[in-house]
Image (cartoon, coloured by chain):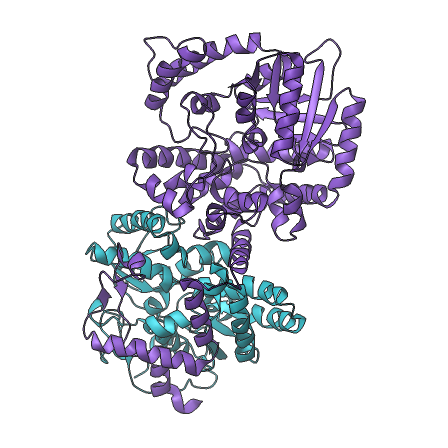
């Protein structure tokens, strides 16, 4: 299956380990991943700050880049939400019926990562191995904007070796909120402190979510407190295998050297064998 | 002693002050979580809750689409039932009407049923200026009034006070305006309620004029409905000779069938009760029973402006249940005063800028007083898309400032938008970032940063940029595919 990856500007620039993990994971599951290099940003930061006019060219560019793909995978609940629920309104606002049609046409083919795995590929066991104590924070836009529901937890529960613990008050916002984190920094931090406290209560080594933006906020607070809890995107947990396990020392977040093979390897990934089952959990065989 | 919200600081400033008050944080956390849990339980019992929400939204949308027709129907039915209908364009006009109606009775005081519309127009201030005392009879409104305080919640205006603070207010203030609180008053809720009951009873029995709002106005019969929990409303609506009701023009429901939907939605959403304790309904004048001089003041005060905005008008569906306040993580931490208006919380953040216009710094800051977490929409009984409205209003704020000298933010946004417009421009910017990442070596967390990044880094570490972007990695590993 051919899949286009929309890495998102934030991941591409600041958290490259996440889209790398998506590539590793999807190739392991037999997908042919493409990264159309003309892609940039979904425009959410502009839209949600009130700069709707500035977001319109990005909507146009998104449909131009992705309209020829059957499946677009996005490792971000928030950016998926923006594409799905804001792009059409932006096109309407710009008074561009052609763009509106193009948005309506491409949007149903855009999937957040957990949606793509569970709904399109039909897998919950992706052959991952992650022997750590983990708690999952369902980000607001995953939960209430695109409604991924239980999908990320279904995927996490199937991970071998994982010790998955429930996060108290999980459904409460962490306080990131895009430019809210800067414009209303005091409230944002007050909300984040409570989230960080709940994370610490679980005794988890790693807090996992489907949005690196929220994780940057939660992780920023945990790091300032020297809490010793790592933040990690869902994709990176799912990409970790027994052959190429994620380790805190080799996390693409903590060490940006070129050693970690699975997610970080400069090695050429193998091409998926034709006819390889995409739903086979045995995709544990990693690239090498 | 009537305080108003005029001249409040903009949200981030007021929020910072509120956050610095640990007692307030504790009171709010306790109260919002209690109501939230109660609501969750009773809403969970209703199998067709989502269907009810749709019905509520549709009924209100029908009203808004045919407001002119229903308003005239209401006026006709009210007049036929012996009530006098007054129309008020704005707060000043509504206040003039009410003041002159009270003056015509010769009374120098009125008892009041809790009413958001009268709060919105600051009727108490107008009455006071005319030498008329307005006595709030809802327990929480009484606490706010006696404490010379401002309401901080739509349903529970004294939510920011705990019971020991209430006791102090009663002991200190009641004697000056009527029956004193007993000297041995404790902070037991039943003792506090008893003190309020005795204090208020004098006023109920003496009052010649009552002022109320209305939760609903049923167009097909001209019936007004007040929904309350303490029985104070029932006293005000039945005992005095004159009853003046100030009603926002969006309070209409077409029929009693529509009303039944809201009578199921409202109690569960607001107080977390299955059924409302005191529901008073009256249709004009009933001879020999209850007030014989009945007035209804229909108030616009910005509502028709809201109606003119096809996206924004859904805010007029609001039935003032305050479920969005109770579930809002921002409200929970800063309380109602930070919003600088009688309508706080998520609904206030979308309603106030629309009713008043994006006139000042406060109104322009309110649409940004949200993390867009969406919890408000999920609990809204009439499905107001509050996050979508907030974003819509943010665009209006930005558009209002276009044309002049751009702000730092506007410049930054435009530069970013220009960069994101073409991938090669983004790559150049990324090269700067990875360059910094390489310079930082093994550091992967940044501590305190200079302004404007200090807004982030005062309490949060920032991630150091990586040494390699994703697209650089892709180019190395998969590049020849392209």
Q: Up-down: is B36 above or below A203?
A: above
Q: Residue furthest bottom?
A: B480
The residue under the point 42% across, 83% down is B424
Left or right position of A66 against A28: right
Q: Up-down: is B7 above or below A219?
A: above
Q: Position of residue A91 (x, y in %)?
A: 60, 67
Q: Up-down: is B307 above or below A61?
A: above
Q: Quadrant of residue B35?
A: top left
The residue under the point 42% across, 20% down is B146
Q: Position of residue B322 (x, y in %)?
A: 51, 37
Task: Supply the letter of whichever chain is purple.
Answer: B
Q: Is residue B108 visible?
A: yes
Q: Which one is nearer the viewer's eye here, A84 or B292? A: B292
Q: Which one is nearer the viewer's eye here, B233 or B190? A: B233
| Colour chain A is painted in | cyan
Q: Which one is nearer the viewer's eye here, B185 or A151? A: B185
Q: Position of residue B192 (x, y in %)?
A: 40, 16
Q: Which one is nearer the viewer's eye here, B251 or B38? A: B251
Q: Please state, as top left, top right, bottom left or bottom right, where the C terminus of chain A lies in the image.
A: bottom left
Left or right position of A175 against B440: right
Left or right position of B39 against A228: right
Disc count in the image?
A: 0
Q: Quadrant of residue B331?
A: top left
Q: Is residue A35 visible?
A: no
Q: Position of residue B14 (x, y in %)?
A: 38, 42
């Amino acid at each position: 299956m051919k899949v286009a990856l929309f890495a998102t500007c934030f991941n591409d620039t600041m958290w490259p380990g996440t889209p790398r993990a998506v590539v590793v994971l999807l190739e392991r599951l037999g997908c042919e991943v493409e990264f159309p290099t003309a892609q940039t940003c979904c425009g959410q930061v502009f839209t949600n700050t009130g700069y709707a006019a500035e977001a319109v060219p990005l909507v146009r560019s998104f449909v131009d880049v992705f309209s020829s793909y059957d499946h677009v995978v996005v490792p971000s609940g928030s950016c998926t939400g923006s594409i799905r629920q804001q792009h059409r309104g932006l096109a309407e606002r710009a008074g561009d019926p052609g763009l509106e049609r193009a948005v309506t046409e491409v949007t149903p083919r855009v999937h957040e990562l957990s949606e793509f795995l569970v709904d399109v590929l039909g897998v919950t066991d992706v052959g991952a191995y992650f022997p750590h104590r983990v708690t999952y924070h369902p980000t607001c836009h995953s939960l209430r904007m695109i409604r991924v529901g239980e999908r990320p937890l279904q995927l996490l529960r199937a991970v071998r070796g994982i010790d998955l613990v429930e996060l108290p008050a999980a459904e409460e916002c962490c306080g990131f909120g895009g430019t809210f984190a800067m414009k209303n920094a005091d409230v944002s931090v007050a909300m984040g402190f409570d989230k960080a406290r709940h994370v610490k209560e679980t005794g988890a080594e790693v807090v996992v979510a489907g949005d690196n933006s929220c994780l940057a906020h939660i992780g920023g607070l945990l790091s300032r407190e020297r809490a010793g809890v790592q933040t990690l995107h869902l994709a990176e947990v799912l990409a970790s295998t027994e052959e190429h396990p994620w380790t805190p020392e080799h996390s693409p977040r903590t060490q940006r050297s070129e050693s970690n093979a699975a997610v970080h390897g400069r090695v050429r990934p193998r091409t998926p064998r034709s006819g390889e089952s995409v739903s086979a959990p045995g995709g544990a065989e990693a690239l090498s | 002693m009537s305080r108003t919200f005029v001249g409040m600081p903009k949200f981030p400033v007021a929020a910072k002050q509120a956050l610095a008050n640990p007692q307030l944080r504790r009171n709010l956390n306790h109260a919002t979580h209690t109501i939230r849990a109660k609501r969750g339980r009773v809403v969970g019992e209703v199998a067709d809750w989502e269907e009810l929400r749709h019905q509520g939204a549709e009924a209100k949308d029908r009203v808004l689409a045919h407001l002119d027709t229903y308003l005239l129907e209401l006026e006709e039915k009210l007049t036929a039932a012996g009530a006098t209908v007054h129309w008020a364009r704005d707060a000043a006009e509504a206040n003039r009407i009410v003041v002159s109606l009270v003056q015509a009775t010769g009374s120098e005081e009125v008892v009041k049923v809790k009413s958001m519309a009268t709060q919105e127009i600051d009727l108490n201030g107008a009455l006071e200026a005319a030498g008329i005392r307005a006595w709030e009879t809802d327990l929480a409104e009484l606490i706010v009034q006696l404490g010379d305080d401002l309401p901080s919640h739509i349903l529970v205006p004294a939510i920011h006070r705990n019971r020991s603070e209430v006791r102090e207010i009663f002991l200190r203030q009641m004697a000056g305006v009527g029956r004193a609180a007993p000297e041995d008053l404790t902070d037991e809720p039943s003792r506090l309620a008893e003190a309020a009951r005795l204090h208020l009873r004098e006023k109920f029995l003496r009052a010649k004029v009552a002022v109320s709002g209305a939760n609903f106005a049923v167009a097909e019969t001209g019936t007004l409905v007040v929904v309350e929990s303490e029985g104070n409303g029932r006293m005000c609506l039945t005992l005095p000779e004159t009853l003046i009701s100030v009603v926002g023009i969006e309070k209409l429901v077409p029929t009693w069938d529509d009303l039944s939907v809201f009578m199921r939605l409202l109690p569960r959403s607001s107080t977390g009760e299955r059924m409302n304790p005191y529901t008073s309904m009256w249709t004009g004048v009933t001879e020999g029973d209850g007030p014989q001089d009945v007035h209804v003041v229909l108030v616009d005060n910005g509502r028709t402006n809201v109606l003119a905005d096809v996206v924004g008008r859904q805010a007029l569906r609001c039935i003032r249940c305050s479920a969005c306040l109770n579930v809002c993580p921002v409200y929970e931490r800063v309380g109602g005063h930070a919003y600088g208006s009688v309508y706080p919380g998520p609904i206030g953040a979308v309603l106030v800028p629309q009713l008043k216009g994006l006139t000042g710094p406060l109104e322009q800051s309110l649409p940004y007083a949200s993390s867009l977490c969406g919890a408000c929409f999920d609990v809204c009984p009439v499905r107001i898309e509050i996050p979508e409205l907030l974003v819509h209003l943010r665009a209006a704020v930005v558009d209002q400032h276009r044309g002049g000298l751009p702000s730092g933010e506007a410049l930054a946004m435009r530069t970013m938008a220009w960069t994101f417009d073409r991938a090669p421009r983004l790559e150049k910017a990324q090269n700067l970032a990875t360059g910094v990442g390489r310079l930082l070596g093994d550091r992967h967390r940044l501590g305190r940063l200079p302004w404007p990044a200090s807004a982030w880094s005062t309490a949060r570490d920032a991630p150091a940029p990586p040494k390699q972007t994703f697209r650089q990695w892709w180019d190395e590993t998969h590049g020849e595919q392209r």
